[in-house]
């Protein structure tokens, strides 16, 4: 017993070091696995509050760009509205819930990150506004990411520029599905993998979301094909996609809340049981 | 409370604030950021309480991790640097560093420069190793370490010169 105490006293500095290093390594490993610890994230009130203050200053510098972006989107929506078919002649189909499937929550990016391999954004709306994990985040140009953690007033987003992110996507003209991943290298490009060889792909083709998951509705823009590679072993294409979005400069975003989500998830859960 | 403790607390808060407000947003060439907040560990008094240094470094790192959403990588890097600090002192200033009055925030000599260089390299290497966490990305880890190290060292030396207490 005496010797144990002696050992502890003699090596207390080293033991404290090992203890602290152990804690940080556990947190690191957790951060790299799918379920991250909730405390060490920028969605808590301290970090979220600080980021909101910083953002309220830096926002002024980007007002002009933001306005232009919103004006462009308004113009696009106006053109959709004016070119719509005569609405009176279309039969209403809300009896089968065919149209009104998603709710949109407006939010703002208060902290952006794109310099590491696992990037997370912070938004200024949280569970109080109805934001929940696994909702899709888009902006006027295209997809941004998926909600990861939420607190009362803030939420973190798993950016598409994160090596852990994997999103269902398809080629717009041919409907071939694949997975959208990021290789951690350039902020302007992501990769679309698992497209079968018999699909016809060409440079410049548009890639959109696939709509096979409940996170994103289908046909939200992602980017265009800029490079085509084929894997000789598996016979699948690996396509390099140039993003529509400038992920280094994000302002207002929309969070997509699918109304069918609960129902689909419950059904799939039953299937798996 | 003596003034050394107060100076250290002030340094802790100011460096952290500067890191989060300014240096985390530089993103030179898209991904190179300097990390001068580690200057706190470098400038900690040579004969100060070593348990205090370990704990302070851990909290310095964990607060950085909260703001960067990075789990525990900054905490691990800071704790490793705090633990290695006496050995780097021994290497740079000779065996008897504890008996001479080593002052880091003074004119830059080769000893001081080598101390800062080794400290920054250790911190950054652990940081990027854990951040990327895959050994097949070793070239990227080394590249990031080298580029960020250059950036951090320039900033650290500049900050030391700026906050150097006036000549008495």
Image (cartoon, coloured by chain):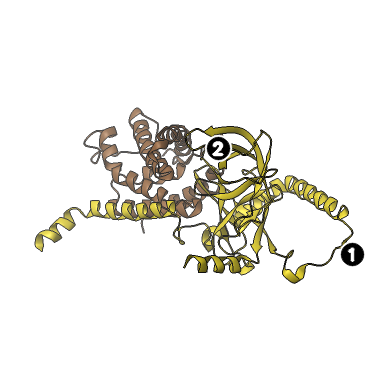
Chain colours: A yellow, B brown
Image quadrant in which the N terminus of chain B is located: bottom left
From the viewer's perspective, is residue A114 above or below residue A10? above
Q: How far across and how far down the image is residue A192, in percent?
A: 57, 42
Q: Residue furthest front?
A: A198
**Neighbour tally class for label 2: few under 14, some 14-19, many 20 plus, Cα within 10 Å:** many
Q: Which mark is residue A238?
A: 2
Give x and y (percent) for residue A258: 65, 63
Q: Label 2 to label 1, Cα distance in Å?
A: 46 Å
Percent position of residue A30, x then y: 41, 55
Whether pointer 2 and pointer 1 mark residues with C-beta atoms closer than 8 Å, the reply is no
Along the line of sight, which residue is nearer the eye, A92 or A37? A92
- Residue assigned mark 1: A88
Mark 2 element type: strand
Q: Position of residue B74 (x, y in %)?
A: 41, 48
Please state which of residues A175 and A229 is positioned toward the viewer in this rendering. A175
Tell whether A162 sits left or right of A9: right
Splitting the image into 4 quarters, where does residue B156 fall?
top left
| Residue drawn at 55 percent across, 69 percent down | A266
The residue that appears at 36% across and 46% down in the rendered structure is B44
Q: Which mark is residue B20?
A: none
The residue depicted at 49 percent of the width and 49 percent of the height is: A164
């Amino acid at each position: 017993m005496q010797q144990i105490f002696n050992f502890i006293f003699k090596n207390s500095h080293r033991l404290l070091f090992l203890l602290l290093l152990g804690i940080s390594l556990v947190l690191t490993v957790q951060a790299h696995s799918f379920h991250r610890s909730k405390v060490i994230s920028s969605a808590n009130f301290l970090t979220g509050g600080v980021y909101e203050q910083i953002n309220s200053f830096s926002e002024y510098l980007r007002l002009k760009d933001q306005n232009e972006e919103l004006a462009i989107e308004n113009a696009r929506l106006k053109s959709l509205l004016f070119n719509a078919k005569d609405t009176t002649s279309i039969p209403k189909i809300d009896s089968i819930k065919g149209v009104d499937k998603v709710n949109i929550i407006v939010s703002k990016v208060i902290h952006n990150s794109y310099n590491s391999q696992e990037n997370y954004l912070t938004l200024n709306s949280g569970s109080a506004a109805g934001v929940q994990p696994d909702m899709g985040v888009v902006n006027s140009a295209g997809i941004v990411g998926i909600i990861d953690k939420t607190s009362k007033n803030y939420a973190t987003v798993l950016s598409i520029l994160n090596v852990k992110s994997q999103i269902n996507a398809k080629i717009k003209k041919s409907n071939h599905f694949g997975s959208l991943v990021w290789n951690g290298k350039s902020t302007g490009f992501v990769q679309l993998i698992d497209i079968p060889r018999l699909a016809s792909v060409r440079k410049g083709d548009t890639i959109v979301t696939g709509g096979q998951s409940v996170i994103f509705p289908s046909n939200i823009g992602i980017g265009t094909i800029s490079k085509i590679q084929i894997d000789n072993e598996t016979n699948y294409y690996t396509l390099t996609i140039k993003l529509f979005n400038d992920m280094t400069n994000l302002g207002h975003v929309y969070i997509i809340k699918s109304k069918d989500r609960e129902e689909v998830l419950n059904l799939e859960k039953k299937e798996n049981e | 409370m003596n003034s050394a403790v107060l100076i250290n607390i002030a340094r802790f808060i100011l460096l952290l604030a500067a890191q989060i407000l300014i240096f985390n947003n530089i993103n030179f060439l898209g991904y190179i950021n300097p990390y001068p907040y580690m200057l706190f560990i470098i400038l900690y008094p040579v004969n100060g309480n070593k348990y205090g240094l370990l704990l302070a470094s851990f909290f310095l790192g964990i607060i950085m991790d909260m703001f960067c959403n990075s789990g525990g990588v900054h905490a691990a890097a800071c704790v490793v640097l705090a633990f290695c600090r006496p050995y780097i002192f021994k290497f740079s200033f000779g065996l008897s560093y504890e008996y001479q009055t080593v002052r880091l925030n003074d004119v830059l000599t080769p000893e001081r420069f080598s101390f800062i260089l080794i400290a920054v390299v250790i911190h950054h290497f652990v940081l990027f190793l854990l951040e990327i966490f895959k050994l097949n990305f070793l070239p990227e880890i080394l590249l990031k370490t080298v580029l960020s190290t250059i950036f951090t060292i320039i900033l650290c030396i500049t900050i030391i010169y700026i906050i150097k207490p006036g000549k008495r």
